[in-house]
Amino acid sequence: MKSSYIKHVAERQLRNKTSFSQSVSNSLTMAYRGLLKIRRTPEQLFDVTLQPIIFTLMFTYIFGGAISGNVQNYLPVIIPGILVQTVITTSIVTGVQLREDMDKGVFDRFKSLPIARIAPLAGALLADTIRYTIAAVLTFTMGYIMGYRPDGGLGHVAIAALLVIVCSWAISWIFAFFGVIARTASSVQGISMIVLFPLTFLSNAFVPAETLPEWLQWFVKINPISHLVTAVRDLTNSGTVGWDLSLSLIGAAIIVAIFAPITVRAYMRRT
Amino acid sequence: MSNVNRREANPNNGDWAVEARGLVKTFGDNRAVDGVNLNVRAGTIYGVLGPNGAGKTTTIRMLATLLRPDAGSARIFGHDVVKESQIVRQLIGVTGQYASVDESLSATENLVIFSRLLGLGRAEARRKAADLLEEFSLTEAAKRPLKNFSGGMRRRLDLAASLIAQPPLIFLDEPTTGLDPRTRNQMWDTIRRLVKTGSTVLLTTQYLQEADELADRIAVIDHGRVVAEGTVNELKASVGTSSLQLSIQNPMDIQVARQTVEQVLKVQSTVSSEVGKITAPMADADRVTDLLIALRDAGIQLAELSVQKPTLDEVFLTITGHGVKEDASKASDESDKVREVIV
């Protein structure tokens, strides 16, 4: 064997704690792995490419006339709504793929390496932001093709897209948690849809909240998705930054603060 | 079975690579590991031998920090696997029963990612990957996705991945299960070379031959417990002494020959009359000379003479009371029969 002689245990520098910079660098390496996997299997990007195209077309032409009188007036309402709905729905895939990935032997190796415990999870979630970016760009592109001209300008549209990507990344920790504790990938899909479907539809994403019965308005107004949609509308349609944006970011931070540690803990326990 | 290549446990190195005390792991009602003690000296190959479901993999997974023990404790080079798990991970390499590499990536990509995770720089990681691939004769397949790899290639890559950080202790969980004999021999050579560089290897196996070929010491594990421990020779000796087998040229002489054998060696012998063969336990090798002289004096012509050492198979049967591949349920009524055949 060519490799040099093994260093004696006593000569090694051993540390029982992983530093913050090591955690970041490990997570980035794991994200690189995620990107390589996406490049090797581009067919897994079907959903993020087709969903924005189909949903934007479908919802705009179905609801446009009924809600805003015509399609043109509905675009400033629906594009931010579709953006939030599509990108957040995409984050379910994170949990599903994590479940599938964890069943493979390679996760045993990750666990046996002296790397930050959070890295395999954080890396996978980080790599998935590429999916959210694709979905966001396609939704805005579809809107533009259909005649959407946001008054906020390109800069604010970009900030809005970034906001949605950040919030989806935060929410993907919830699905990552489901992914870690669930037995099968399909059950992750099932649970996540049940959670996400009411959240995205019982919001102001597709219809103005004022048209809803009062008891429902109450829920729609506290629904974090509504705040995110409003924040996006403010940014894209008027270029303003409001309380809704702060609320969305605070909400995202809270979700990460709760779900990242319990997900890592569950991941460590499950073997 | 050859003992030619066996090295003695390195006496000037008093370090224990593994010290496990009373390890227990329960899955539901099943006590998969039920109080396992293991001591592995640094620089040796240690074999954990047992049938399927004996608790070998669970034991390894606890020692490799992949599973938390329900009870008991384990130290790797003096570091506790639970309290100092991150230190332990810096000292071990794990090659699982199922290849722990990324199926959708190429061999190079796998090794580069593991190297980067272990703190190597970009260029350094590439060089390390290339070196290891060459060392394990995988250079040609470096860019191919692993889906097209044979079982042997996958195992080699898996082992290569475990060696990136040059860990002083390597766990190999059934490294040759499912490999063809040629690939198995290559794997054995690789493992032997590993130990020459100063590594300690703890391997599990279902194959007695593998333990015999590779391991300095062996623990036989059954139903989650260590049922025997020692060097290969100690284990073989624990079953009993070697046996002397004599074939007689003229079958008519067999009764006389048998009497002579029993008188001179002072033991009970058995006879299989159809081939004219006498088998007797050989406690004292010196007496064989007396026996041969006595036989010549009696005018008995020998066709063949051989000494049979007990095999590890017999060791296993004797210790566990059942065959390696056998179900525990069948064991009780069959073990008696089996023993009669052996003795």
Image: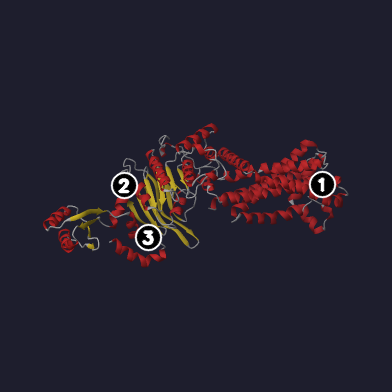
Q: Is residue A127 left or right of residue A64?
A: left
Of residues A104 and B305, the one drawn nearer to the viewer in this rendering = B305
Outermost residue toward the left in this view: B297
Instruction: Check chain identity for marks 2 and 3: say if they share one.
Output: yes
Q: Position of residue B109 (x, y in %)?
A: 55, 39
Q: Amino acid at mark 1?
A: Val
What is the chain identity of the residue bearing mark 3?
B
Q: Which mark is residue B323?
A: 3
Give the residue displayed 84% in from the left and 55% down from the top.
A211
Q: Position of residue B152 (x, y in %)?
A: 46, 45
Disc 2 + disc 3, Cβ < 8 Å: no
Q: Which residue is mark 1?
A: A77
Judging from the image, the colouring scheme is secondary structure
Q: Amino acid at mark 2?
A: Ser
Q: Which mark is residue B2?
A: 2
Disc 3 + disc 1, Cβ < 8 Å: no
The local crowd at label 3, few if under 14, some if 14 to 19, many if 20 or more residues have their Cα within 10 Å, is many
Cα–Cα span, label 3 and label 1: 74 Å
Q: Is residue A190 left or right of residue B32?
A: right
In the rendered image, the quadrant that contains the C terminus of chain B is bottom left
Q: Earlier in the sequence, mark 2 or mark 3?
A: 2
Q: Position of residue A143 (x, y in %)?
A: 79, 43
Residue B259 appears in the picture as rendered: yes
What is the chain identity of the residue bearing mark 2?
B
Give the residue displayed 21% in from the left and 54% down from the top.
B304
Outermost residue toward the top in this view: B123
Instruction: Check chain identity for marks 3 and 1: say if they share one.
Output: no
Give the residue displayed 86% in from the left and 49% down from the top.
A68
Element assignment for label 1: helix
Q: Picture quarter containing residue B145?
A: top right
The local crowd at label 2, few if under 14, some if 14 to 19, many if 20 or more residues have their Cα within 10 Å, is few
